[in-house]
């Protein structure tokens, strides 16, 4: 929402701008403590007991002097009287009176310490305690109570000043960062010290060895002189060259060591500079002005003293008499006693601005502080709009004129947060809403801090996280397991000691990141450790402590690798390992590893049994919700999610992922509402948060999306690995090159080349890690976009779906890509490994589809998947459930809608296999009622071609009535030609007669669908053939290439092929000539088109023309130009072909050439010409089938099945008996990869039956045929 410009919002923008440009510090007052708890006193509450001490007796007397009937409640009277007394004396003078009455300064110190909440520890918990108005207060201090303080100190203020005595700001500051950095610094300095000693050692060693080498070379030179002089010696002097070379090698090795050491020292020094820079960023508490010299910025400066702890010396700054600034004298003398603090603030105010939080306009601290810096504020007074002080107010108080004038004179910009315009502005800027469930003042400050907050990725915490992650990974990669198979006790002992040198660092940093790098470099030692885990534990049993440490590393390694324990250990070994589980934490971790394995293998019984035994924590809640998700039981999953309120970032992300399965918008809202949890967590979790927000929220505007993407880029540039890179790492290791995925058999006659895919068993572990990574992140595979393409997912899925069918199914169905889902469905269908499990999967999915709570994203993919599984499961298992789906009115509506595809495919594939009369008739009646829809014709066509339909009687009352109605509408609707063409065999004799009578009324010339002509020919070829031929000769469909005009072409293959009439020879010579003229006209159009565009493919029409010329050659060969026309078309086709002979095509791996050559060979076989060439090429094809060689196998099988089943081709196969039998034998044992198995089996059955017809009974071939009719395929 856009607002009109206002001073209020402009001032807020200026404040933010100054903060971002490092021109802002903050001053925190007493009121800010109220955000923790009301026991933090206001000025009035702080002074109450003091005022009562000074004037309590008089107040009590005054109360008693009031007549009883006129008295107000005593507490109210005393509160009012105390208030009047404080107002009359003044805050600061009241303190002075108290000190004077008590007689010593220390009295006010103990008073303040009594009233200021202090932190104590009790039973491993923190509490804040104080005493006010005679009441002892004690409240547990939780992390959430410090949220606002944490938010404030994490904003990029130059310095944080406070007048508060309490330690809440310090508690909100993570001091451990500085401690960790100092420890890292110390470790590196110690390494450098050792390196310097090594440097001295190798430098000295090198000098010494060089001196020795010089001496050796001098001796060698002398020996050579002697040798030359005394040449008559019978025994030659021994040469020392080998010793000299050995010495040179020693010196060279020392030089290498010196280079390595110097490089390491240099690298360490760079690291030390980085660490020092990070230390500078850590907030440091300053309570003494001398500490101001340590660093200029990033300090928490206690201006009025800090609550004393045990052993703290008395006094504040340089004032040993007073520990707290509170009295009038303290304020008056502050510039003198605490000059360094005063000057710092005055100088800072010249250079920057201040934001005041927790002050009221009459707060003494505020008013006195203004006095100290008055002269700075009065300078350049003419620039009053250049505010130096921004006072944040959270109360909804109407401004007083005198106070507003005071603010203006001192260039104080008051920002009243409780203003509708301000609230709306901050909500719009942050995308958050004011939280109305909490205290309004807290909610306003929360919103303000969210508005002021800019993601800061230069914090010490991020540096430490990355340092620890690198150190952890390097420690694992440094473990050597080369001698792990050794049997020598000494070698084993050394190996175990070497492994355990890395133990402390690994154990200390095992939680440095949630997702560990599983790159080979970092995981090889973990894999080796697990593979030889039992051996290592047995080898170390002589030392129980070392043995336990080895087990600790084994447990960490299996968690890091994200592989199920079943992959490394058998049940006996698991029991052995469990004997090392000593602590509850270890037992829990191992149990959840087992639970995850049961989830992956989808062992329902064991999963639920183990789950009952485990504590109901975040892990169990998530695993149970996942179990319901894997079961597609989204109702139970939602109930589980509704009862789960995780507080850790890891599980909030995981819960959001499960919510995303139901609704992406809800997932984004849930995640956004928990952003602060991620900000307080690790940089890795924050990175996951940013990426998940983009993944879920499609409504993010471009500005916010770009901003979040910039955060992601920064974090990843610092070495943190985001979601995309986590998956890319695994995909790269799998070396996946995504290819276009289609159904098996989908391109069997396609004129495009295909690639045979390979499967590498070694990729199994990486594929499991891919799924485990999904589970660890909790994200669905598809959100606003896909984490990985469907093709990439398929490469993972195909490797492990038989081992983990349910998880693979769950993630597969999150895609809606038809070709990939159907290919996966085929893999499940053709898997022998899955066996009867396919029945359960199909049955369950059909039941699930009918459930209202099934998310829409799964509906489409379930239909695609099941459409391929029908063929593998007997219809008696699923047909009744299919019928329930079919009878859903909405489903039927979509099934007949040609804009929808999933319902159509689902029904088509089911129709091919159904067996029940009720199912057939239900679909037929619906098709009759939707006959105008093209899908209805396709449904009927597939019903008719289902073998089970042959014995089905469709003539029930409803269908008969509808058929009788539609017969008399044939003349008006072309679609009904298809309806009755498909159902002709099921019509009564009377109905068949009525159909023929109605066809006589049809205007044949107006028939536009080539398919309708084929059906009409069936009905007309006896009685109406002349009417039919006349209509056909007048039709535009004959040789219709698709020319709309000479310059416009729509290639759609919408032509009527004359080949359907070839066998019947229906044309007279004059009719053939008319058709020939039509062909020449179309050929002329093609010639002219080719002059402009040589790339357009007219192959389909050239083949149609050539077929007509050859079939009708007896009627046409006398026509002038016939031969040239035929040669021209031949030349066009030859230009298209990339092979010289049919045989060359058959020995190539070019699918396009093979398909074209099959068509040519088919023509030769049909025309009974070139028998020798046919026989040779047939042998090539059969050999190709036998060796399952390369591409186009399905197409070749189909052609062979068609040829061999033709009675006229019987002699053609007589010489190929042996190879045909070998093919049947080969395919009965093993199928080629990446084929549609039901289709292949069907062709083999046809070939087998034809074989028996040609060669007679053969028991072996009969066995082959039965094996191809395996019971799980019903098509």
Image: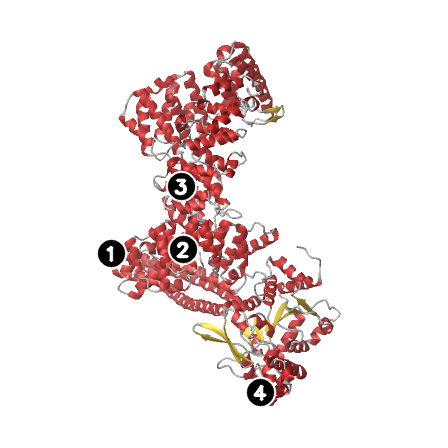
Residue receiving disc 1 = 235
Residue receiving disc 2 = 522
Quarter of the image where the C terminus is located:
top left
Residue receiving disc 3 = 843
How far apart are labels 4 and 1 at the CA level?
105 Å
Of badges 4 and 1, the one in the foreground is 4
| Res. 1106 visible in picture | no
Q: In screen coordinates, is 1239 left or right of 1267?
A: right
Residue receiving disc 4 = 105
How far apart are labels 3 and 1 at the CA level?
97 Å
- Snapshot quadrant of residue 1184: top left
Residue 44 percent coordinates (x, y):
62, 78
Mark 2 or mark 3: whose residue is earlier in sequence: 2
Model colouring:
secondary structure
How packed mark 1 is, by other alpha carbons closer than 10 Å (few <14, some 14-19, many 20 or more), is few
Which residue, as the protein is rendered here, is positioned at the far front? 69
Q: Nearer the viewer, residue 539 or 195?
A: 539
Query: Helix, strand or loop at disc 4?
Result: loop
Residue pictured at 62% horizontal, 59% vertical: 427
Q: Are marks 3 and 1 in contact (CB under 8 Å)?
A: no
- Snapshot quadrant of residue 1140: top left
Residue pictured at 43% horizontal, 72% vertical: 124
Mark 4 or mark 2: whose residue is earlier in sequence: 4
Whether residue 354 is situated above or below residue 692 in the rendered picture: below
Of badges 2 and 3, the one in the foreground is 3
How far apart are labels 4 and 3 at the CA level?
86 Å
Of badges 4 and 3, the one in the foreground is 3
Query: Helix, strand or loop at disc 2?
Result: helix
């Amino acid at each position: 929402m856009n607002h009109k410009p206002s001073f209020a919002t402009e001032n807020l923008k200026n404040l933010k701008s100054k903060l971002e440009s490092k021109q802002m510090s903050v001053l925190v007052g007493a009121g800010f403590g109220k955000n923790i708890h009301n026991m933090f006193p206001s000025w009035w509450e702080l002074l109450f007991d003091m005022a009562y001490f000074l004037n309590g007796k008089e107040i009590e007397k005054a109360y008693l002097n009031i007549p009883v009937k006129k008295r107000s409640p005593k507490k109210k009277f005393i509160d009012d009287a105390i208030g009047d007394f404080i107002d009359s004396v003044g805050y600061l003078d009241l303190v002075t009176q108290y000190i004077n009455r008590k007689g010593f300064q220390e009295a006010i110190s103990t008073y303040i310490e009594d009233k200021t909440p202090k932190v104590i520890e009790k039973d491993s918990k923190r509490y804040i305690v104080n005493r006010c108005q005679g009441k002892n207060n004690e409240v547990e201090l939780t992390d959430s109570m410090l949220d606002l303080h944490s938010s404030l100190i994490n904003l990029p203020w130059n310095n944080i000043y406070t007048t508060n005595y309490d330690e809440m700001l310090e508690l909100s500051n993570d001091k451990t960062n500085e401690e960790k950095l100092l420890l890292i610094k110390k470790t590196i300095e110690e390494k450098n010290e050792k390196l310097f000693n090594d440097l001295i050692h190798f430098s000295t060693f090198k000098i010494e060895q060089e001196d020795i080498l010089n001496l050796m070379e001098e001796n060698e030179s002398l020996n050579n002189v002697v040798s030359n002089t005394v040449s008559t010696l019978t025994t030659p002097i021994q040469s020392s060259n080998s010793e000299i070379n050995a010495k040179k090698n020693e010196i060279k090795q020392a030089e290498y060591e010196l280079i390595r050491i110097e490089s390491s020292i240099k690298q360490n020094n760079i690291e030390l500079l980085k660490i020092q820079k990070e230390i500078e960023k850590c907030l440091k508490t300053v309570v003494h002005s001398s500490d101001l010299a340590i660093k200029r910025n990033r300090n928490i400066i206690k201006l009025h003293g800090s609550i004393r702890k045990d052993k703290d010396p008395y006094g504040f700054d340089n004032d040993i008499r007073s520990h707290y600034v509170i009295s009038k004298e303290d304020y008056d003398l502050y510039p003198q006693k605490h000059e360094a603090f005063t000057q710092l603030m005055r100088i800072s105010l010249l250079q920057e601005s201040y934001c005041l939080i927790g002050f009221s306009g009459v707060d003494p601290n505020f008013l006195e502080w203004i006095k100290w810096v008055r002269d700075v504020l009065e300078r350049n007074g003419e620039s009053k709009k250049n505010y130096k002080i921004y006072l944040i107010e959270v109360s909804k108080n109407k401004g007083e004129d005198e106070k507003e004038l005071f603010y203006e004179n001192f260039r104080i910009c008051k920002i009243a947060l409780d203003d509708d315009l301000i609230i709306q502005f901050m909500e719009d800027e942050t995308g958050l809403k004011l939280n109305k469930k909490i205290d309004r003042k807290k909610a306003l400050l929360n919103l303000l801090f969210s508005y002021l907050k800019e993601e800061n990725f230069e914090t010490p915490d991020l540096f430490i996280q990355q340092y620890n992650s690198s150190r952890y990974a390097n420690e694992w990669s440094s473990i050597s397991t080369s001698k792990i198979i050794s049997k020598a006790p000494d070698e084993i002992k050394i190996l175990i000691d070497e492994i355990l040198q890395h133990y402390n660092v690994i154990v200390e940093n095992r939680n440095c990141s949630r997702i560990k790098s599983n790159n080979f470099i970092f995981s090889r030692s973990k894999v080796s450790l697990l593979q030889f885990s039992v051996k290592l534990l047995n080898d170390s049993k002589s030392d129980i402590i070392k043995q336990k440490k080895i087990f600790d590393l084994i447990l960490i390694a299996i968690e890091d690798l994200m592989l199920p324990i079943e992959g490394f250990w058998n049940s006996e070994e698991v029991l052995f390992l469990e004997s090392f589980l000593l602590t509850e934490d270890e037992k829990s971790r191992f149990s959840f590893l087992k639970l995850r394995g049961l989830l992956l293998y989808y062992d329902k019984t064991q999963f639920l049994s183990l789950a009952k035994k485990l504590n109901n924590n975040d892990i169990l809640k998530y695993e149970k919700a996942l179990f319901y998700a894997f079961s597609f039981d989204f109702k139970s999953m939602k109930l589980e999610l509704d009862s789960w309120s995780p507080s850790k970032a890891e599980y909030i992300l995981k819960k959001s992922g499960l919510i995303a399965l139901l609704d992406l918008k809800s997932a984004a809202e849930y995640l956004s509402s928990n952003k602060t949890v991620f900000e307080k967590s690790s940089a890795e979790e924050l990175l996951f948060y940013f990426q998940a927000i983009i993944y879920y929220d499609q409504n993010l505007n471009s500005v916010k999306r770009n901003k979040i993407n910039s955060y992601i880029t920064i974090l990843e540039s610092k070495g943190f690995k985001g979601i995309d890179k986590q998956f890319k790492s695994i995909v790269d290791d799998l070396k996946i090159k995504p290819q276009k995925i289609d159904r098996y058999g989908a391109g069997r006659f396609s004129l495009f080349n295909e690639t045979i895919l390979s499967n590498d068993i070694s990729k199994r572990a990486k594929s499991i890690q891919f799924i485990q990574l999904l589970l660890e992140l909790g994200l669905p595979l598809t959100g606003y976009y896909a984490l990985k393409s469907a093709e990439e997912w398929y490469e993972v899925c195909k490797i492990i779906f038989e081992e983990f069918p349910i998880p693979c199914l769950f993630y597969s169905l999150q895609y809606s890509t038809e070709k990939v889902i159907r290919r996966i469905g085929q893999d499940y269908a053709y898997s022998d490994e899955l066996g009867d499990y396919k029945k359960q999967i199909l049955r369950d999915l059909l039941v699930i589809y009918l459930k209202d709570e099934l998310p829409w994203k799964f509906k489409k993919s379930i239909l695609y998947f099941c459409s391929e599984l029908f063929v593998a499961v007997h219809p008696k298992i699923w047909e009744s459930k299919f019928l329930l789906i079919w009878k859903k009115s909405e489903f039927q509506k979509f099934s007949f809608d040609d804009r929808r595809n999933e319902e159509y495919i689902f029904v088509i594939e089911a129709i091919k296999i159904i067996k029940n009369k009720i199912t057939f008739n239900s679909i037929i009646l619906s098709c009759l009622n939707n006959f105008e829809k093209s899908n209805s014709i396709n449904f009927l066509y597939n019903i008719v071609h289902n073998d089970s339909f042959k014995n089905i009687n469709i003539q029930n009352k409803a269908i008969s009535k509808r058929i009788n109605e539609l017969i008399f509408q044939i003349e008006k609707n072309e679609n009904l030609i298809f309806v009755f063409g498909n159902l002709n065999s099921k019509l009564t004799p009377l109905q068949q007669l009525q159909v023929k009578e109605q066809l006589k009324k049809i205007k044949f010339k107006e028939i536009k669908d080539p398919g309708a002509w084929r059906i009409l020919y069936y009905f007309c070829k006896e009685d109406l053939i002349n009417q039919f031929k006349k209509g056909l000769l007048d039709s535009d469909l004959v040789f219709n290439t698709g020319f709309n005009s000479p310059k416009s072409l729509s290639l759609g293959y919408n032509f009527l092929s004359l080949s359907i009439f070839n066998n019947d020879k229906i044309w007279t010579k004059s009719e053939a000539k008319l058709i020939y003229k039509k062909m020449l006209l179309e050929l002329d159009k093609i010639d002219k088109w080719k002059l402009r565009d040589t790339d357009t493919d007219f192959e389909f029409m050239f083949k149609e023309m050539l077929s007509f010329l050859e079939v009708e050659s007896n009627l046409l060969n006398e026509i002038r130009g016939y031969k040239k026309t035929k040669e021209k078309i031949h030349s066009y086709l030859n230009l298209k072909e990339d092979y010289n002979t049919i045989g060359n095509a058959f020995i190539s791996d070019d699918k396009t050439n093979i398909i074209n050559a099959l068509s040519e060979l088919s023509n030769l076989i049909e025309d009974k010409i070139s028998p020798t060439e046919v026989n040779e090429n047939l042998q090539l094809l059969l050999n190709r089938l036998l060796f399952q060689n390369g591409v186009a196998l399905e197409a070749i099988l189909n052609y062979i099945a068609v040829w061999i089943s033709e009675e006229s081709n019987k002699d053609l196969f007589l010489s190929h008996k042996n190879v045909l039998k070998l093919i049947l034998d080969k395919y009965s044992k093993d199928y080629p990869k990446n084929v549609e198995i039901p289709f292949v089996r069907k062709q083999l059955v046809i070939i087998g039956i034809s074989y028996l017809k040609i060669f007679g009974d053969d028991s072996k071939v009969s066995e082959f045929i039965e094996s191809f009719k395996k019971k799980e395929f019903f098509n």
